[in-house]
Amino acid sequence: MLFTYLLSNPVNGAHFRLVGSDGTSDSSPSNTVVYSAALPAVTGLTATQGSVAQKVTLSWDSFTGATQYAALRGTSKNGTYVEIGTPTAATIFDDTTAQPGTHYWYKIIASDGSGMISSPSAGAEGWAMDMPPAPANLAASDATFTDHVHLDWDAVSGATNYHVWRSDTQGSGHVEIGTSPTNSYDDATVADTAPKYYYVTAENAAGISVPGNEDAGSIGPSGSGLTLVITNPPAQGDGSSGDPYVVNVGENYGFTLTDSVDGDVTLSPNSLYQTSDPNATASNGNLSIGPGTGDFEFDGTYQSNQSNKVYFKMQAASALVILPHPIDPNWLGVPNFSDPDAGTSSNAYVMHNASFNPDNNNDGTYDDNFMLEAKENGNVVDNETLTWASFPPFVALDVNNTGTKGQFHANQFSVGYIFAQSVTEESNHLYVEVTLTP
C-alpha cells in the first residue's frame, strides 16, 4: 500500500525520515532524505567584444539568494567549458587570461549558502581588444626637402598613436625617433643626405603592432635653397615619390628652377637638368616625354646646389588605339605611321585646308571629311560604339559610317588632341595640327 503526505513550504535542505506505528508501537526510522529545490539559471549574461584591452569583462543579472558564482569559459558555443573564476556576490567578472583577439564563449553558474547550484546561463561570446595591424604603404620623401624627410602611410583603424623608427642600414638597426597621433611625420633630425630607412608601428590600448613596410628617404643638400616646380602639372599625382605625376609619351610640361638668393634661374647657363631616363629631356623650361620613356626622376642643379626631385610615372598603355585611316588621302604625313613619335605633341599629324570645303554654314568653321581608325588589341573597332572628343574642343567629331570617323569641323588653326573612350578605357591622345596651307 502506498501512502502520500503533502508538506507545504518545506525549507530548502531540510532532512526527513518516516516512522510507522500500529497504535501501540513505532517502527524503526526510515532512511534520511534531504529536500533540495532546483535553482533557476542566471540570466542577462553579456561579455565585452574587443572594446576593452587585456581582458574580457562579464556582467549578468543579480540572482536572489546567490552567495557565489562560477565563471566558465570555452572556445566554442557548444564545446567544453572550464571554470576560470569564482566571483562572490558581485555580478561582474574580468577574464584577464583572455588572449587578445581570441574569441571565447562564457557561462555563469550561481550557488547559495546551502550548496545548491543553478543550471548554467546561456552562453555569451566575447574577446579582448586585439593589437592593431602593421601600418601599410609607408612612403618617405627622397631629397624633396632640404631640412626634413616627410613620411606618409595608410591610417590604421583604431590606432591611437604611431611610432616612427629609423636606421642608417636597410633591414636592421632601427631605433624609435618619435611618435605621431596621425598618419604622417616629419623627421627634422636628419643630419646628412645619405639614405635613411624607416618603418612605422601602430598603437592602441592593447599594445603595439609589428612593423610595417620599410622605405628609404633622404634630405636634399643642406642649405641649397633650390626649388624645382612643374608649372603645368598633370592631373594625376603630386610629383612626390609616393604619388608621382602620371604622364604619357609625347607630352610636354613647363618647369621653373628657383634659387633662394638669385630667384628664377631656369634659363641660367649655370643651371643643369637631369632625368633618370634619357628619353625624357629637359631644357629652356620645357620637359619633353619622348618615345620609349619609362618611369623617371627629374631634378636640377645650380652653382653646384641640387634641387628637390620630381617623380614621374608613365601611364599604362591602352589596348584602344586611334590613328588616321590609312586609305584617307587628306592626311599629310601618312608615310610616318611607323614613326612611334608620330601623333604626339612634338610631331602632330597635319591636316591643311587645301581640301577644306567652304564655310557654307557661316559659322566660322571649315567643313572637311577625313577618317580616323580605332583598333583594340589590333582589331578594328566600330567607331559608333565609342565616345569621341578633342582637347581643347577645337574640332567636332560625328560618326560618318561604320569603322571610320568623319565630318571634321575645325574652328581654329591650332594643335590639340583627339581621343576615344570605350566603356572600360581611354585611347591614346592623337595630336593633330590644323594649318591654313600645306
Image (cartoon, helix red, strand yellow):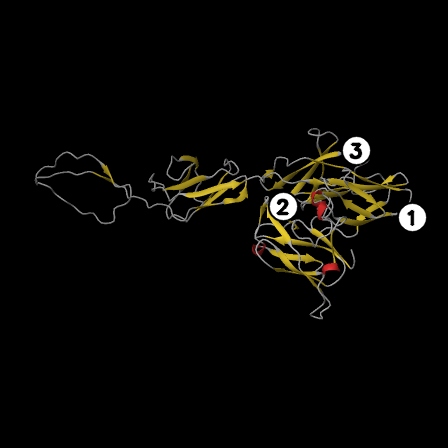
Distance of mark 1 from mark 2, alpha carbons?
44 Å
Placement of 124 over or under 174, stated as above or below: below
Q: Residue 199 placed where, x, y %?
A: 68, 36
- Residue identified by numbered label 3: 194
Badge 3: residue crowd in 10 Å (few <14, some 14–19, many ≥20):
some
Check disc 2 and report its element: helix, strand or loop.
loop
Neighbours of disc 1 within 10 Å: few (<14), some (14-19), many (20+): few
- Of marks 3 and 1, the one in the foreground: 1
The amino acid pointed to by label 3 is: Ala
The residue tagged with tag 1: helix, strand or loop? Answer: loop
Q: CA distance from mark 3 to mark 2?
A: 39 Å
State the residue at coordinates (44%, 43%): 125
Mark 3–mark 1 Cα distance, whole angstroms, equals 27 Å
Q: Position of residue 184 (x, y in %)?
A: 70, 45
Secondary structure, mark 3, is: loop
- Residue 290 visible? The answer is yes
- Quadrant where the N terminus sits is top left
* Residue type pointed to by label 1: Asp
Residue under the point 65% across and 55% down: 371
Q: Is residue 203 left or right of residue 190?
A: left
Sequence order check, earlier mark of 1 and 2? 1
Can you tell which of label 1 and label 2 is closer to the viewer?
2
Quarter of the image where one finds residue 163: top right
Residue position marked by numbered label 2 in the rendering: 318
- For the question of whether residue 246 can be seen, the reply is no
Q: Nearer the viewer, residue 299 or 409?
A: 409
Identify residue for label 1.
Answer: 262
User: Residue 281's x, y, as percent?
Assistant: 80, 42
